[in-house]
Image: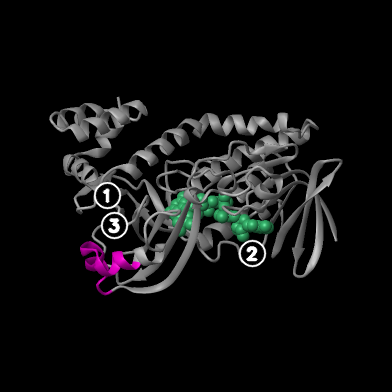
Amino acid sequence: MELKTDILIVGAGPGGTATAISALKKGGKVLIVDRKTNVGVPVQCGEAIGKTGPGIAEIEIPEIAILNPIRGFRIYSPNLTKVDYAKPEPDGYIIDRRIFDKELLAKACEMGAEALVGTNVTELLYKKDQIKGVVASRFGQKIEIAAEVIVGADGVNSTIAKLSGLRKNIKLKDIESCAQFEMVNVKIDDVDLLEFYLGKQVSPRGYVWVFPKSENRANIGLGIGGGMGEKTALEYLNDFIKHNSRGKEICKNAKVIEFRVGALPMGGPNPKNILDNLILVGDAAGQVHPITGGGMGYAIVCGSIAGEVAVDAITEEDTSEEALSLYEALWREKYGKEFEQMLNLQKLLTEAEDSLLDKLAQILSGQNVVELTAGKKIGIFLKAAAKRDKQLLNLLNQLRNLQLVQ
Ligand SMILES: Cc1cc2nc3c(=O)[nH]c(=O)nc-3n(C[C@H](O)[C@H](O)[C@H](O)COP(=O)(O)OP(=O)(O)OC[C@H]3O[C@@H](n4cnc5c(N)ncnc54)[C@H](O)[C@@H]3O)c2cc1C
């Protein structure tokens, strides 16, 4: 079977459907393919998305995908000192990714996109050394799809990124390996706060998250840096639940109703995400926050930019790498510096002793952290608090060098 379209999007996750929606708004002709027969399943996500963060302006979150509004978060340092960052009003949501991904695909199709689920892209098609489409397998049948622009939105293990040479293999250290339980009967203190637990014993270069889905139900998971620590992600997660004093307390009567594993690209964006006739977005492009591992919002914003650039390039009959470089320029203008700073902060936090995180938490505990960070007063506050402490002053200087505090 041979098919033809203007914009072929490989992957119907948030990056792919956001690309489709923005291209369709500009009158583009779009085909989305996904190897899953049921997009969004299995869920490989903590399902938290910010309300004012990246992504929300570009798409409307489908109402039926929203499970729980969130006002902020509570960080537990290694010795379980609490620091709250909570706004008066909801600032984000826990969503149901099963519904979210499918509803965004439905929206794209209602707007005019064609979709082929159960379609696994395996090869790129070339004509005179130029990428001109893909080969896919669909229920045992081989199909060829020709397109003016191919968008690789096919996630962390992107086939398109590998085949095109834009990202061959992610280094082990740049992969975060994740394990997550969805649990009921969890003792949740504040249903509208996300909880994060830090510390080398809890999770090397990561954190445990407790994301409340309702008064007694939560996603409890963690990620560990590739090659770090002595145990698997699942073993660390079980340790938290069974042996950490707080983990034991909140999970005393909890029961696992779902187990999920997944991986995240934590090494920052690929050096390049475009070629002639080809664009990468989302996890395939490495557009994931190097500390939080949040990627939905970035995938949506960058996908939205990609959709517009692709339509304009097709209209101008120039889909060369040079024409598509506008996508690269626009998304890097928005997030390039942030990713760079957060990669440096990731390194700093990975190397930080647990005792330093405890000290920092001690200082910030009980403070109005929202106000301190919004007003950029945090530098002055930390300087005053760290007066006679060499370890904290050193940290403050490093944060200043990264231009994270003034
Ligand atoms: C455990 C875990 C927890 C997370 N928690 C959060 C969180 O709370 N908040 C947040 O913002 N982010 C979170 N993330 C990250 C977030 O899930 C991703 O960044 C986001 O899904 C990226 O969207 P995407 O569209 O780029 O890729 P994906 O959502 O991965 O979608 C890629 C799609 O491509 C399809 N595909 C792959 N290969 C092919 C192929 N060869 N042919 C056809 N189709 C293909 C897949 O089936 C999939 O549907 C988490 C990730 C993990 C692993």
Q: CA distance from mark 3 to mark 1?
A: 16 Å
Q: Say whether mark 1 is within 8 Å of ligand 1.
A: no
Residue at horizontal 59%, vertical 54%? 157
- Mark 2 or mark 3, which is nearer the start of the sequence? 2
Q: CA distance from mark 2 to mark 1?
A: 36 Å
From the image, give the main secondary structure of the stretch colored magenta. helix
The percent coordinates of residue 242 (x first, y second) are 27, 70
Mark 1 sits on what residue?
75
Residue at horizontal 60%, vertical 44%? 281
Q: Which residues are magenta?
A: 238-253
Q: Say whether mark 3 is within 8 Å of ligand 1.
A: no
Verify whether residue 130 appears in magenta: no
Residue at horizontal 62%, vertical 36%? 272
- Mark 1 or mark 3, which is nearer the start of the sequence? 1
Report whether 352 appears left or right of 153: left
Residue 36 tag number: 2
**Amino acid type, callout 2:** Lys
Mark 3 sits on what residue?
201
Mark 2–mark 1 CB contact (< 8 Å): no
**Amino acid type, callout 1:** Ile
Residue 147 tag number: none
Q: CA distance from mark 3 to mark 2?
A: 36 Å
